[in-house]
Amino acid sequence: MRLPDRMAYMLFPVGTGHRDNQLLELGRPFLWAIPVAAVLGLFSAVLEGLGIGLLVPLMYVGLAQEIPASIPPLLRPLAEFARSFSPEVRLLYIGGAILGLILVKALVIITNANLVASIEGRVSHRIRQRLAGHLLRTEFPYFLRHDPAYLVNVVATDSWRAADATRHIFGLATATAALIGFGTFLALIEWRLFLMVSAGVLAIRLGQTAYNRHVRRRSVWVTTANQGLAARMLHLVTGIRMIRVFGRDAYEQERFDEASEDVRQSMFSIARATLLVGPVFEFSLAVLLIATLLVSTRLGVELPVTAAFLVLLYRLQPHLRTVSEARVGLASLQGSVDEVERLLARPVSPTEVSAVERSGTADPAALPPADIRFDRVSFRFPGTDRGGDALREASFVIPHGRTTALIGRSGAGKTTIVNLLCRLLEPGSGRILYGDRELADIDVGHWRRRIALAGQDVDLIDGSVRDNIVYGQPGASDEEVFEAARLADVLDLVKDLPRGLDTSVAARGLNLSGGQRQRLGLARALVRRPQLLILDEATNAVDGVSEASIIRLLASSRWFETALIISHRRSTLAACNYGIVLDAGRVVEQGEFATLSYVGRMESPHPATGTMP
């Protein structure tokens, strides 16, 4: 049975409590465990209360006194139990019963701790799993607008802190149930003292509620500081070459130290605010204990009963502290919880959902070969001003079966066209057609399986050379892998590696040169035998020998049907037989490559690099 949202949020108070609370939905499968933990907490309190209650007859026996008729009703059955034994063994049996109750209580606590640890781990896993899945389905422009360090911090840090809220929730449930159990014992032992204690605890609780608001505000500082430190860490790892070349080590150290110091101060602020709760709470309860002793003397409560009440009240203290610290802990995690919920609440891209979750309407493999046509396509990135279009009513054709050059200065719109072809972006206006079908009507997953991209920014995975080649074609045979590696001039690379194609590649290919990474990325694209091969500056880091091999590959076109080439190297563009020229997002020329006036105006390439000016 599905609990109403309000009731579910009362059990699992994480996030905003709104209907679209993603964290609440992630915790729903484990809501059953919260009442179980509460029952176990109540059971442990009852066991401890009974053990403490046995102290009363134990003290009467130790004082060699008869049990008076005025003993509280709760303690009378325990006293009768003690009197059922002979005086010689009475003390021994009462002590044994107390130890037995403590042992059973310890087993209950261990069971509860294992339950909480298991549920906390599962909730933490589900949060990270949902975050990864959500990012995989998030629209591509979102990644262009946000600093990668922010996303890394949410997934790597905020998700863990949000999962910590589960531990506080279970601690709150267990301790609250224990308080109910202990409170019942206190009320039955001496109701007048219980009323006084309840008033004192309520006053402490009101002060804590106001303090939690202060801690919640500080938690936002922690989240912001962590994001800044993550940005500095990412910059150090990815920009170390630039830092060293320009001699900015001291400058970057200073910036990192500032970010780290901000994190230290924010974390210390939270730690100080959290740690302050314990001592203040303990002092308040000590005042309450002394006041209880003084009032019990005034009321004439017998010493054994007063002793049992004070011991119960003292044992109540850890559970009161747990409730207090759990509430402060939840407040201190609020900043991280808000970031995780904010990311999960973002609408996912319908395009990416279709790529993952549905089979699609048309498989390009079943479509006849056709040209790709842009019909008055415009695109503007979100947040840019009017007039800042990346593409402006661009109309052109990528002919099937030919190698087309996409030419233009930086910022002309070439990468935007590539992203539109890969369905990472969708046109703001206009249409992209495959033959007579709109590209939007073809399932994005099927479409992407028929294209391959290799570029200057090669994203290599942490695996072997072979793993990187087959990344886009997991079922590729050894022969296909070997042939793709040969065509991309990768075999010369692996022959010097200790394990050949099975040699490990470091994360992002940092143990390879730029040219080696580009050749490996090209092999990964070729092994798919794509219908459309896109090379986006895929030869700008390779040497002349490798480039010659790639040009021969483009000329043969055995491993692809159509190719789109973006390059500033005139030697690479010489392999193209069709061309499209862009300027500031507009198509200014297209046609046979050799006849383009733009090509005729190009100066001779640099003799060393072959690049165009």
Image: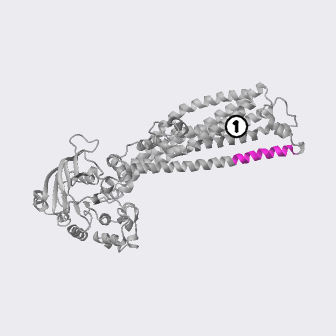
Q: Is residue 61 visible?
A: yes
Q: Is residue 385 left or right of residue 158?
A: left
Q: Looking at the rendering, which quadrant does residue 385 occupy?
A: top left
For the residue pair 257 and 61, the one nearer the viewer reads as 61
Q: Is residue 61 above or below residue 374?
A: above
Q: For mark 1, what is the residue?
A: 314
Residue 421 rendering spot, x and y as whole percentages: 26, 54
96 is within the stretch colored magenta: yes
For the residue pair 366 and 506, the one nearer the viewer reads as 366
Q: Is residue 431 above or below residue 472?
A: above
Identify the residue shown where x is 86% and y is 39%: 83
Q: Quadrant of the N terminus?
A: top right
Identify the residue shown where x is 31% and y is 69%: 484
The type of residue carrying mark 1 is Tyr
Q: Callout 1: few (<14), some (14-19), or many (20+) C-alpha neighbours within 10 Å?
A: some
For the residue pair 535 and 236, the one nearer the viewer reads as 535
Residue 455 rendering spot, x and y as whole percentages: 28, 60
Q: Is residue 365 left or right of residue 97?
A: left
Q: Quadrant of the C terminus?
A: bottom left
The magenta segment is 89-106
Q: Looking at the rendering, which quadrant does residue 34 occupy?
A: top right
Magenta stretch secondary structure, dominant: helix
